[in-house]
Each structure stands twice: as structure tokens, then as C-alpha cells.
Amino acid sequence: MASSSSGKSVPAPEAVQVLVSSLADESPVVREASAATLKDIASVNPLLVLDCCSTVSRGGRRRFGNIAGLFQVMSVAIRALNKADVDPQYMSKFAKVASAEIISTKELNADWQKAASGVLVALGLHLPDLMMDEIFLHLSGTNSALPAMVQILADFASSDAFQFAPRLKGVLTRVLPILGNVKDIHRPIFANAFKSWCQACWQYGVDFPLHTAIDGDVMSFLNSAFELLLRVWATSRDLKVRVSTVEALGQMVGLVTRTQLKSALPRLVPTILELYKKDQEVAAFVATCSLHNLLNAALLSESGPPLLDFEDLTVILSTLLPVVCISNDNNQQSNFPVGLKTYNEVQHCFLTVGQVYPEDMFAFLLYKCRSKEDPLTFGALSVLKHLLPRLSESWHAKRPLLVEAVKSLLDESDMAVCKALSELIVVMASHCYLVGPAGELFVEYLVRHCTIDLNGEHTESSKDFIMSAGSFNPFMYKKSEVKIGGVSPTELRDTCEKGLLLITVTIPEMEHVLWPFLLKMIIPRIYTGAVATVCRCISELRRHKNTQSDIIVSDFKARADLPSPEDLFARFVVLLHNPLAREQLVTHILAVLNQLASLFPKNMILYWQDEIPKMKAYVSDPEDLKQDPLYQETWDDMVINFVAESLDVIQDPDWAISLGNSFAKQYELYSSEDEHSALLHRCLGILLQKVHDRSYVSAKIDLMYTQANIALPVNRLGLAKAMGLVAASHLDTVLDKLKDILDNVGDSFFKRILSFFSDRAKMEESDDIHAALALMYGYAAKYAPSTVIEARIDALVGTNMLSRLLNVRHPTAKQAVITAIDLLGQAVIGAAESGTSFPLKRRDVLLDYILTLMGRDDEDGISESNLDLLNTQCLALSACTTLVSVEPKLTTETRNHVLKATLGFFGLPDDPPDVINGLIHNLTTLLCAILVTSGEDGRSRAEQLLHILRQIDPYVSSSAEYKRKRGCLAAYEMLQKFRTICVSGYCALGCQGSCTHNKRIDRVMNNNFSNLPSAFVSPSRDALCLGERIMVYLSRCADTNPEVRKSSVQILDLFFSISLSLPRSANPSNGLDIELCYGALSALEDVISILRSDASLDPSEVFNRVVSSVCILFTKDELVAALYCSSSAICDKVRQSAEGAIQAVIEFITKRGMELNDTDISRTTQSLLSATNHVLEKYLRQETLNAISSLAENTTSRIVFDEVLAAAEKDIATKDVSRLRGGWPVQDVFHAFSQHTVLSYSFLEHIISILNERPIFRGDAVKGENSNNVGESSVEDNVLHAAVIALTAFFRGGTRVGKKSVEQTYGAVFATLVLHLGICHSLSNSGQQEPLRALLVAFNAFCECVGDLEMGKILARDREQNEEEIWIGLIGDLACCISIKRPKEVPIISLILCKSLDGPSRYLREAAAAALSEFVRFSESFGPLLEQLVEGLTRHVSDDSPNVRRLCLRGLVQMPPVRVIQYTIQILSVIVALLDDPDESVQLTAVSCLQKVLDSASTEAVEPILLNLSVRLRNLQVCMNAKIRANAFAAFGAISTYGSGPQRDAFREQVLAAFPRLVLHLHDDDLGVRRACRNTFKRIAQLMELDSMVALANTHRFSSDHRGDYEDFLRDIARLFTQHMSSRIDTYMASLIQAFEAPWPVIQANAIYLCSSIVAFSSVQHISTLYLSQVFGMLIAKINRSTDAIVRATGSLALGLLLKSTNSSWKSTRLDPPDSLLVGRDA
């Protein structure tokens, strides 16, 4: 620490005054720093701080801008005073200042006013009497600051209750007289003060006797205040006043006398209760808390009996009951904490009363429960629930009364009441209240409310279902109405479910009540929603109860009011309908069935033990179940099979009849819209199938139809399937019933016409009936025995009976009729498969009906959604397939009609995908069925196949992927079907070899075609048009979609496998090598096998194999036809497919081009050129031109080349070739030429010669901006322009041939381009942009040609940018790229560029220097050339151009490390010279390069110039350029490595001298400077020879960017300086004081803090003697004069450091009036 015994004391008063004045600074940062410093030093000399604060406070807030901050400092200083320093007279001045500010305004709760109050409270901690006397002076009725003074007394009471309580008498003496005159606006403050004073008394009473603070006088005062507050303030119209008054009265009730309290009760209680009328949660909470205190004081006092009888308490309790409801409601809202607190306080109030009057409380609550007001009932139930466990002993004898009261509430419909009642029932159960019939009643109540749904209504209608068997009658249900919004239906239901499970599992006494009573809850309709919970409870009961079967049966038979086993089984089976029902309903039902198996016939037990676990496993994972779209249908079938098998194992007709009756009664349990009815129909249907009593069956059929809601499609389908199940055993009975229904419909068509004009509902009803009838007929035919259905179907179709069912318009009705027709067709097919075949009469008419029904039909006003229409069409296609597949064969007209109506479905959008996929599948199946059943011979079927395939072609080549996929899959399926019927070895059903189908077909074919040649029976190969067909699907083999690719390859395989088995043409030119063809076909099939097994195979490899096989399998005529058709394939809308077509054409030409004659070549060329003109994508055009090149290579090429060149000159003369849409085709031909082996070199040589002989862009400089107008250019310019374009095109050829030609002259080309880049930039600066653009285009083409993609990216990055740094950097990047990619070319290029350094043009020299500076980085193998380069670069470091100077230096440094070491001395001499360069960019380069050289430089090279370098680097460390500054610091750290030699001491002196500056810049404004300084600090810390310095560099505060951490670091550095480097303190102090004037404010602040820290922590006496006063003075000047906030703020903190360090010298210093520097000055 700084010595305090020096001969010169610190100017502490002046420093503190400056800090105090800084509290009013305009910057918040300075204010905070000054306040923090003053609060910190206040502990040293609080009196001095107070003196200075007192000085500036004389003018008040009008003269001091931050009076709040000043008062805060004063408060801290006063609290820091020792008892010996507390001068009452002096403290009174601050009391008066603070009070004066408070009373100077009428404002309340301003920041400065609160701070002034803090001063008085702080004074009160030392001198409570002084503080109170000051406040008492202003406690008069006319003083505007009266509320503020009272608030101060309240704050003091809260801060120090032990000093306040004994002085309460004095406070009350002065406050009571003015209470009567307090305005309403101020009364909350006074009331809050009384609350705080009373709380202080209660706190005082914890440690001391309360009577020592509250004597008779105080009690009298409190009584008076209590009376005033109660009589006057509590009746105020202002709610805020009333709330605060009641809160105060609640604290006072325990302090006033019992007499006073008793007399006040008649007024106090209503006053408190009045607050509940206001709809405010806070008011209710305050009132409840006050009531709780009041009840404790009045009822539980130890000094006497209760002051209130229970009759007096009824009003309070009646008021509190609705509060329970409101608080419970608020628990769900945003004010949850307030509502919960209020609810708890209310319960405490009731408990307090209940402890004193338990019986009266019980009677009161029961009375309120019987009231008709829902809030009171809810409150009473909630209180009962709360008090029952706590007052159980006192209420034990009241159990019957409570049970009867709860019974009377069981018909309540309010949800809040129901929830409270349910919770109370659970509590009662836990205390054994639920016994006997009453217990069953309460259990039924819980079950009934487990059925409530999310809308607040029960899952069933309001009508109760009362089982006829038994005497039990459920409660009449009344519709729930939500009168209190706090309870939702879900919450009520969850409460009842959890409560029922809780009493089942946790209360053993409830077992006798629940079992077997819960079985009665299964059957009634109103309890349907609770079946899952009831079943779960039954399972829990059976798990804990003895599970022997005889006991279960005995329990069941002991009660006559339980449902029969048949009723239970029927109910459970129907409820199994939904496998995803909530609460795992299905699982619980199956578990209960398994546990109750002993109630059923014995044979069922073994079957159920095996089947029920399977069914439970199927529904065990709902998420997995949802993945199956047919899970519901599958599950329903499992349930029906479960019923059927159960009936089969029983073999008891009587039990089956009884079960049928139970199923019949089930119809009353479900609404007509309930989907359970569909399963119920089927259950009854499968049961009737097992019954042989026809009259019983007929009666139940009538019941099914009567109960069925055929307007609902699900139930309609369930009824139809049920009828079908019955028809399996009772067909005639079912048909008779259906005929009766149909006859009863009457003249349906006429009625429908009338209904259109009269009643829409009648038309829809008619639709439903017709749809149901149609489905019932269909399923009856499907399930009926095949031996008896022919006559029935003939009667149905042949007599127009079915036509009566077709006049429907609703979508679901249409679908039902279509399904019925489909079922009829399936019945015919099924009969044929069983050996009973017969034709379906009027089949074509039925097809027409289906096609009509599947169309959109809106003319009658029934709107049909798109999804309904798609579903209808999907069913219609399936039905068409069925009808097409039956006898007789399709006629041509019908076939064409079906195709026209259905093929358009291939173009439907792919949404929704599940419906669309099914529709497309059905359409494909239909097309295959048409192909099978149409045509009389192979040729006609081939024509039909081609006809359908050509109509599908637009979808096969569509741009939409889903259309291509559909088209290819359809074509594949049709070809497969075609092969099965037209190629030997397959039957129409796909069987291979000898089979019954094949024999039957052969017999029919022999009968029909025995007199015809075989050629008419089988199609010929030419009939398949393979050339055309293969090109359509060959391009698809390269499609983007893997499924399309696989399907297309399979299509090709099918085409060729079929063609090889058909008769071949007699043309000898089409001869094929059969062995070779079969080998190619085998290879094609291998590809298919690979595709099926490995979808990740490279598509290009697959396509290559396919093309190779196709090329072999083509005949000559088919090849020519394919080439003729190649144009459309090349122009395919899918790029990959177009590429594949081009690839195929090239391979066809390459392998078999010699077979083409002149005509073939001509037409093929026309096709390819046409494709070139129509293909807009550049890549595809290039590939097409490659095909042309291939054609020219394998035929006559000269004519093609000549035409292209002539076309180029013509286009240049007549067109703007740069703006042609899709590009210039001739330019693409140039690319093709460059790729040709023979023409490539000569073509490049010709272009080079043109460019060498003619001036580059000679005309551009003349024409200026019109140089792009080719139409106005001269012929010479056209030729030149064409040469440039040709050169660009040559570069862009990109093949090995063109690249090889470029490689031969690579160095010269690159050097020329680089040098001209500089020249073109100079022209660009003068406004001539075209040369630069053309050169960049050529350069980019060159990069593409030689494969330097990185160089191309470099060019594209900053093209046409004229700034020097950009284009010089561009050249450097290009040179770097070349050096990496082509190191062998670098010596040649470097030699050319080195010679260019001597050129006259500045831009030429800069371009050469930029390139060479990068090339030298890769000069390991240059040899003698390197010396020449180093010499040239060194010579030009004195060039006129700064760019040349810095580039040459950078080049010298960027040599390989081995070479840099070789020339280190020479390079360092250049760097030392350039460190003083007048150009900053050169300086920056020099200091940056220095670091690189030092990384590899030897000590011998650096030591001679070490001191020279350190001096120059220190000069650069104060540069305004942040980058130079950062690099200078970094380089200084780098040279420290060499400071261990002979010049070690001298260099260490340099380091020590520069160390303060380094520390200051550790927190520079620039991030780069900070990082460089940190790294350098770590390096030179070793030279400091201080272990603590090295450790300091590893701390968090060193690496942190936070200002506070940096200041901590500075303090640590200052300690090191003073402890270990005392000899350099003078030098450092001088350097730091000089830094006070640095150009950067942050450096000034850093210097200020470090300098102050050194002085503060120094133990050397002369440091304090020399610098303490100087630094103090400078800090004060900086704080007063600096314009930078950071300087002023840091100066304030630094002053605090100095003051704390010299605390002994000014600890007793005071501010004398003559010393005041701030008197009269405005802060």
C-alpha cells in the first residue's frame, strides 16, 4: 500500500469532492462509477464523504442533477459510521437536508424521494430519536410531506423493529391527532404504516415481553387508531383505502384490548366481508388474511372465552364459502399464486372455527350443502373434504347425517359441485363412510360421471336405460350445465376415474361394496363411457380377491339384480369395436372376459385362454396398429371370428338362442349413428348363421333392418355383411326379406322425380334404401353357396330388378351400388372357380351403369367432393375389372368405351396418395383384363397392345414423375399379361408349363383357328414396332426415379423376350445372330436381377448395360427406325432421360454405324440437328453435338465441318450470336471440334496464329461501347471475334484431346493472359470494358479446358472489379492456384514474367510482381532461376509503384522456408528499410512479413539488427492503423525469441521499456490488437524473470474482454510492479503519465487505472512522495475536463483506489469550509 507517513498528505477532500460532483455527470457510466467509488471509500472516512455530499446538497436537486445518487451515497456513508463518529448535531444537518428535499414537493415515490427517505432511515439506525424528532417536526396536518414522513417511519419499523417498538408511543402520540385530516389519496400510506408498526411489535414480542413496548397509553392509542380506522377509513369509497385499512386492522386485532375488539366486532366483520363483493383477487386475499387473524384473536385467545358465538360466525362462514369456489376457479387462471393463497387462508378460517365449534360447523356445512346455490354447495363440499380428516373424531357420531346429505346432492348437475362431491366421496371412502346400499349409490355416482365427454355431456343421451332384469334403477340424468368456469368436463371425468380406481386399489373395505356390484355398471347405456374404468376396477378386484371359479359363480348367483352372462358377453363383444378406444377399453374388456370365464359354458374357457391373448397382442401397440390402413376391418373380422368360434365350441342351441336375444337387446344401448351398431349387426348375423329355426331367423332379420340406420355408410355396410352371413345358411329367407323391402319402396323412380321438386330429404332417404338393398343383394350373393346362386343372379339381373337400385345420386349410395355389382361379378367368378361356371347376363349394361355412376354428377344439386369422387372411381375400376373378367367376352364398342372413360386417370394429381395409388392399381388391372379378354388372335392382341401403349406414351414421357411412374408400371403389367397369352408356355393366369388353364385355352384356340395359318394366331416381330417402342422406354431407363428405371428395363426385356419367340421377318438384311441375341437378353435379365436386389447400383452403369444389350438385339431396320425416332427421345422433359437417349444414339452409331447407307446418314443427321435446335439445355445440346461428331467420325466428316464453319461466319455477320435464345448452336459445334482427335491440334494452332498476327481488340478502342454490335462491325472484326469465340469454345471443349493441345503451350498462354489482365484493367479504368470482359471469358474458358476449377472460381469471384487490391489479389490467387496444380509450368511462366518486370507499363509490372510474389512460394526446384527471381524482386523494392514494392517484398518472404533461410539477411535488410516506408500499405506488408521471416530466421541473421528492429516496431506500436499496431505488437513478441544472445541485456531493456504500453493495449478498442498483445505478453513474460508474471498470463481475467476483469488484471500487474520491479517504477510512471494524453480514450483510461494502482499498491515511500499528488491532480483534471465517459468513469474508480490505499492519512480528514472547491458551482 502507498505509504501514509510521507511528508505530503493526499488531497482527499478535493478528490472526494470531484467524485461527488461526478455523480451529476451526463454519462450513466460515470455516475455509476462515481457512486460505486464513494460507497466503497465511505467505509474508510464516512465523515469526509458526508462533508462533501453536504457541500453539494445545499442547492438541492435544482442545482445537483443526480440528487438521488447523492442521497444513496449519503445513506451508505451514514450506515458506515462508527458509534464514536456519530455526532447528533452534525447528523441533524443531514436529517434536515433530506427532510427539506422531501417536503419541497408534493410528489410521492420519486427516485430521489425514496433515496432521501433512505438517508433518514439510515440515521434512525444510529440516532432513532434524532430521526424521529426530525420527522415529528413535519408531522402536522398542513404539511404536504406528511405521507412521506409516515412512510419513513414504516420503513424504519421494518428495518429495525427492536428500536422502533419502544418508541411506538411517541409515534402514535403525533400521528393520531392528524389521522382525522388525512386525505383519501394518502390513507393507504398511513394504513400500511400501521400494519408495519404492528408487525414490528409482533416481531419485538418474539424476543422481549410485549408489555415493555405496549403499555396502557400505547394500548389506548392503538384503540383510538383502531376505532378511527374502523369507523371512518374502512367506509371510504376508495377501494384501495378500504383494502389497506382492512389489512392494517387485521394486524391490529391482536394488539387492542379484548373489550375494544369485542365492541368492534359488529362493525369490523361486515367491513372485512364487504371486500369480497369486489371482483379483485388481491382484495379477497387481504380480507381472508384479516379474517384469519380476527378469528384467531377472537376465538383462540388464552385470556378469555371466545368473543363470537357460532350464530355470529354464520355470516362470516356463509361469505367465505363462495370464496372457496372463486379461489378454486382462479387456480386455473393467471393469478394462480394469489388464488391458492386465498383458498388456503379460507380453509384455515374454517378450521379455526371448527376447532372451537365442531358440531355447529358440521351442521352449518350440511345445511349449506342442501342449499340450491351452487357456489355455496361447492364451498361447503370443499370445506368438508378439508375438515373431515382433521375433525374426524369430533364428527364420528355424525356419519349417518353426512351420508344422507351427500345422497341429497347426487342429482346436482353443476360440474364444480360434481367435482367437489366426487372428491368428498373418495375422502369418505377412506374413512369407511361408504357401506351398504349407500356405498353402492356413491360408487354409481362416480361411474356415471366417468362417462362425461369433453362437451360437458354424457356419452349417451339423457334418457336412462333401465335394465328389465333386476330392481336397480340408475339415477335420472340431467344435462350438465357449466355455471362455474373453473371445472372442465375433462377435469371432472378424470377426477371420477382416478377416485374410483383409488378406492378400488387402496381401500380394502370397499371390496365388499364394489364386487359384484360393478357388473351392474356394464350394461346400462348411460354408463357406456365408463366401461373401461369399470373393467379396470373389476380386474383389480379379481386380482386381490380369491379367484376360484366356484366363488365367482357363487358371488354372481347371490344377487338377482346382476345381468346375465349372455348379456355381459353380448355387451363386451360389441364394445370391442374400436381397438383404439380411450383408456385401453379393448384390453380391459378382454381381461375381464378372461377373468369371468367361469360364468360361461365350460367349453369356451379353453378357447378363450388361447384366443384372448392373441387379440390382446394385436391391439397392444396403438401406434403400430395405426400404420395399417385396414386395421379396423381386420379387427372387426377377428371379433366376428371370436364370436363364431365361441358358438362352435359350445354346440348349445339354447345358449345360442339366449345369446341372440341378448344381441337383440343391445340395439337399445346404441344410437342409430353409433358405429357399434355395424358390429352388432354382424355379430347377430353370424349367430343367426348357426341357428336353424327359420322363424327365429326371419324375426331377427326384421329386427336388424328395423334397427339399422342405413343412412350411415358404416352401419349400412355392417347390415349388408350381416345379411350376407345369414344368407350363407338361409339364402331364401334373406332374399324374401330383400324382395319385400324392394317392393315396399314402391315406384322409386317416379317418387325420386317428385322429391327433386318437393323434398330433398326424401330423395336422400330413397338413396339410402336403394344403396342398402344393393349391398345386401351383393353380400348375399357373395356369401351364398355357389351351387344355388345362378338362378338368383339371373333373376336379379335379367328381370330389371337391379335397375331399380341404380337411380341414386349421393356419393356413398353410388359407391354402395358399384360395390354390389362388383360383388355379383365376384360371385360369378367364385362359382366358376368352384366348378359352376355360367355367363353374367347383361354384363355390358352393368359396365355402362358403372361408368355412369363413377362420373361427376352435379346437375341434381348434390355436391360431390373430390375425395368422394376418387373413392367412387376406385371402386368403379375394380368393379369394371370384375365384369370384364367374366363371360361373355367384351365387344369392341364396349372395350373402346371403357378405355376412353378410364385412361385419363393416369393424369390425376398424386393427392391423396393412398386413394390415388389404389385407383391407379385398379386402372392397371383393368387394362390387363381388357387385353386378356379382347382380340381373337395374337395379331389383334398385338394391335390392341400397341394402341393402349401409344395412348399411355404421353404419361410415360411426362415431366411429372408420378405420371411417368404410373405409365411405365402400367406398360410393364400389360406386357407381362401379353406374354402370358401370346407366348407358348404361359397361360392367361400366368402359370408356366402344363396346367388346366393352358389346356382349356389350347382347346378353345384350336377350335377357333384350326383353319388359319399360324401367322394369324401369333403376332409377328414386325407387328410390335420394336424400333419405335424401344426408344420410348429406353430413355426411361435413365430416369431419375428408380422405380421408373427398373420398370423400363423390365419392359425392354419383355419386348425382346417376346420378339425372340415370335416369327421373324423374311428380309435377309435383318438377319440376327440368335446365339448372340440370347446372350444379350441374358445380360439384360442379369441387370433386372441386380436392380431387384440392390437399389443402390449406379444408374449409369445399369443404363450402359441396357444400351449394350439393346444394340445387339436390334435388327438393322429396327436400328434405323430407332435413330429416326431419336429426336423426340433426346428432347425428353427429364434431363437424365435425354442424356440417356443421346448416349444410346452414340453407342448405336459407334457400334453399328457402318451398316448405315447415305440416306440413313442424311436422315439421322437431320434428326440430330433438329434435336440440337430444340434442346435448350446447354449440356444436352453439347451431348447431342457429340453424337454428331461421332456420326461424322464414323462416316464422311468434311462436309459436316465445312457447313458448320460457313454457318459460323454467316451468323456472326447477320445475328447477335450472344443473345440467341438457348445459346449459339455453332459455338457448341466448336466445342465438338475441339474434342475431336484429328481436328483438335490444327484447330487450336489456327486460332493462335490469328491472335498472333492480328492486334487484340483493335476495333474495341475505336468503337467504344458500340463494339458489341456485330452487325455493324467490319469483316476483319467478325473474323477476329470469331477467332476469340472459337478459342473460347476450344478451351471449353474440356476433353483430353483439347486439353492436350493446350498443355503443349500452357506456360505461354497463361503468361500472356496474366499480363494482358493488367493491361485490360488499365483500359477498364479508362472506360473500355469490352477487352476486359472478353479476356475474362477466354480466361474462364482456359480454366475449364485445363481443369483448373479453382482458378475459374477465383476469376468469377472478383471479375471486372477495378480496385487495385482486388485485381492484384486476383492475379496472386491465380498464380497460387497454378503453382499448386501445375508446378512444372511455374519456371517457364516465372521466366516470362520476370522479364516483364522491366516493362514500361506500371500495370504490367504490377501484374508480373503479383504473379511472381506467389510463384516464388513454390520455387524449390527453380535452381539458378531462383537467383534471377530474387535479384529481380530485390531490385524492384525501390520501384515507383507502392504496389510493386510491397509485392516484391511479399514475394521474397513467401519463398520456401529453406530458400528464405538462404536469403534471410538480404530479406531482413529490405524489411528494415521498408518499415519506415511513407506508404502505410508497405509498412503493413513489411511488419507482416517480418513475423514470417522470424519464424525461420537464424539467430546470427537477426541479432545484428535486433535492436534496430525493436526500435522501429515500438514506433509502429503507436500507429493509428489498427492492423499495423496489431502486427507491430505481434512482431515484437516474435523477436523476443532472439533476445538471449550477446544483446540480451540491451534487448531486455527494450522489452521492459515497452512493457507498460503492451499492458495498456491489452484492452485496446481493436480486437486484433488485444489478441496480439496477449500473445506477446505470454512470450515476453519469460524475459521478465518473474514466475508470478507467467502465472498471471494464465488467468481468466487476462484473457477476458470484460472491462471489470481487465481492471482486476491491472491491479495484479501493479502489485507485481511494486513488489518485484521497484527499480523501474519511475520509468513506468513517466510512461504511463505520458499515456494520459494518448489518442485513444480507452488507452487513457487504462493508463489512468494502472498508474493509480501502482501508486496505491506501492510500498516505496518516494513513489508516494513523487507521484501521489501529481496523479491526484491529473485524475481530478481528467475527471473535470475529459470529454470521454470512459476516461471520467475510470478516473473516478482510480481515485477510489488511491483514497483507499492512503486511508490512514485521511481517515480523520474533514472538509473545512475554506477547502470547499465546489461551493457555488453548478453540478
Image (cartoon, helix red, strand yellow):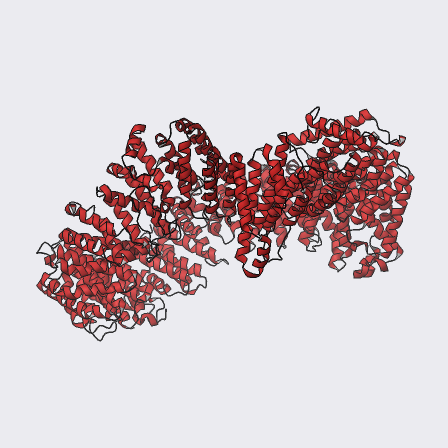
Q: Quadrant of the C terminus?
A: bottom left
In x, y percent, where is residue 271? 20, 65
Between 45 and 1046, the residue placed more toward the observer is 1046
**Above or below: residue 1192 compared with residue 123:** above
The reply, left or right, for residue 358 in relation to residue 518 is left
In x, y percent, where is residue 981? 73, 32
In x, y percent, where is residue 891? 74, 42
The reply, left or right, for residue 960 in relation to residue 648 is right
**Above or below: residue 1544 compared with residue 1403:** above
The reply, left or right, for residue 499 in relation to residue 835 is left
Which residue is the extreme one toward the front?
695
Which residue is the extreme one toward the bottom?
142
Between 437 and 80, the residue placed more toward the observer is 437
Q: Quadrant of residue 1161?
A: top right
In x, y percent, where is residue 1192? 87, 39
Between 833 and 1704, the residue placed more toward the observer is 833
Residue 1455: tell me if it is visible.
no
Q: Quadrant of residue 578?
A: top left
